[in-house]
Image (cartoon, grey):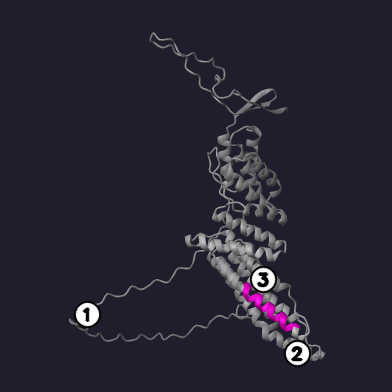
Amino acid sequence: MLSSLIWLWLAHAGPGVATPPCNQPPKTAAKQTTNTAAKAKKPKSIELGPMLFRIKDGRVKKIEQLSYRELYSVASRMYAQKKYAQSIVLYKRILKYFPMHQHLYAARYNLALSYEDNNQCALALPLYQKVIQSTPKKKQIVLNAKFRLASCHSQLKQWQKAFDLYDKLMQRSLEDEDRIDALAYAGEALFHLKRFAEARPLLELSVAIYARKLAPKQIISYAAAMAQYYRARILDVQFRERPFRLPQSQLKLDFEFKADHMLKALRLYLQTIRLKHADWALASVYRVGEMYEKMYADMMAAPSPKELTKEETQIYFQELRKKIKILLEKALNIYKKGLLLADRIGIKDNNWKTRSKQRYEAVLAFYTKHFGPHKDSKKATSKPTARKTDTTPKTAPKATKPKKADPKAVKTAPKAVKAAPKAPKVRTTTKTKTAPKAAQTTPQKPSSRPAKR
């Protein structure tokens, strides 16, 4: 069986040149009834897209008329439904059969978005670069493409390239939301490059602009929450990397350093939670529990005084374990609160929720092994005994006469009871790119916000 696909371009003629319909002669202009000179009507220009002829065994089995608008509409709908594999096929078809279309940049940009959301950032990079180079007059689409290009480098862990792009974006005149994004993601890149001194002011400025410009409008910002989180992470990493060392004077300095950085990091993690972004709130809760665990592990691994004998050293660590077990109790409490928070805001599948659950179970097992059953342990829970109730019927109280109202008493309206404040709403989704609307030849303005990583 021989199967081939033949596509033909029709109506290559430019605007203003008549193109007769298929298999029909051109219509002649109608003559005017007046005595004036007959004027021919200008023929309409009919522009058709490519047609695909599907031939099998020498016969045409199917003829398909392609339309940019229809292909774009279906591809946009597939993207909105997160069916990225299908949207990729359709957008690639547009690029193949409509290479000269005036809105080709829209399909190319959306194809890059589909690759990015399908975890194929390496394929999205050249498409974003092509959009930037081929559409210099479309300033907004070029700006969005630059943000997306930098985001792809971040997702590929190419932090230096990502920072270089964000650094160029920061030097431009940007709107508040774009400025917050550029500062936050540049700070994230510097954090992963271990350039903490350079990252800190960028992250602080991102949070400050958000607090001044967007927070009064009650706008939840993914980038601002991330910036606050990485401010805490800088202190967190410095806390983790500082060991306990002898002599005693150095041990004291190390303890003060770790305690100071731990308290400052905990404060910033708490501020991250208050920004009400679900993902970064759960990440912050997890990191707090992890810091309590780390402090316990570091103190147990700290060197003991050299003057102690072997037996005295053993007793020393036994007593130390009892003194600092409260750190494990705090870690359990924090992990538990994180799980409750995830359930309360309706998060079922989340990386931070999964990790919190794993650490909670591991710490609970360790605590039960070394200190006995914890209040959260299944062994510690016992069924409450039912209380005995008196089933004998009680006599009804005697009816009392109602008191007469005092006419001299001044009637005062009862005060309204204030309702308890509602719990702050936490957004369960990150701010993601806006999917292009269906049935549009020009794309909806896509957001420049990088996707959650």
Q: Is residue 6 above or below residue 197?
A: above
Relative side of 191 to 40, left or right: right
Q: Which residue is mark 2?
A: 315
Which residue is at the far top? Answer: 35
Specify whether residue 182 is in view.
Answer: yes
Numbered label attached to residue 410: 1
Q: Real-space Cα distance between discs 1 and 3?
A: 63 Å
Residue 235: image tag: 3
Q: Of helix, strand and loop, which mostly describes the magenta segment?
A: helix
The question of residue 19 being in magenta is answered with: no
Quadrant of the rendered structure where residue 134 is? top right
Asked if the stretch drawn in magenta spans residue 262, the answer is yes
Tell me the residue at 62%/58% (across/down).
183
Which kind of residue does numbered mark 3 sit on?
Leu
Mark 1 surroundings: few (<14), some (14-19) or many (≥20) residues within 10 A: few
Q: x, y percentage for residue 50?
A: 61, 28
Q: Are marks 1 and 2 in contact (CB under 8 Å)?
A: no
Of the numbered discs 1 and 3, the one sitting upstream in the chain is 3
Earlier in the chain: of badge 1 and badge 2, it is: 2
Marks 1 and 3: which is nearer the front? 3
Please name the amino acid that badge 1 sits on: Val
- Indicate the amino acid at tag 2: Ile
- Between the C-alphas of marks 3 and 2, the distance is 33 Å
Q: Which residues are magenta?
A: 250-265
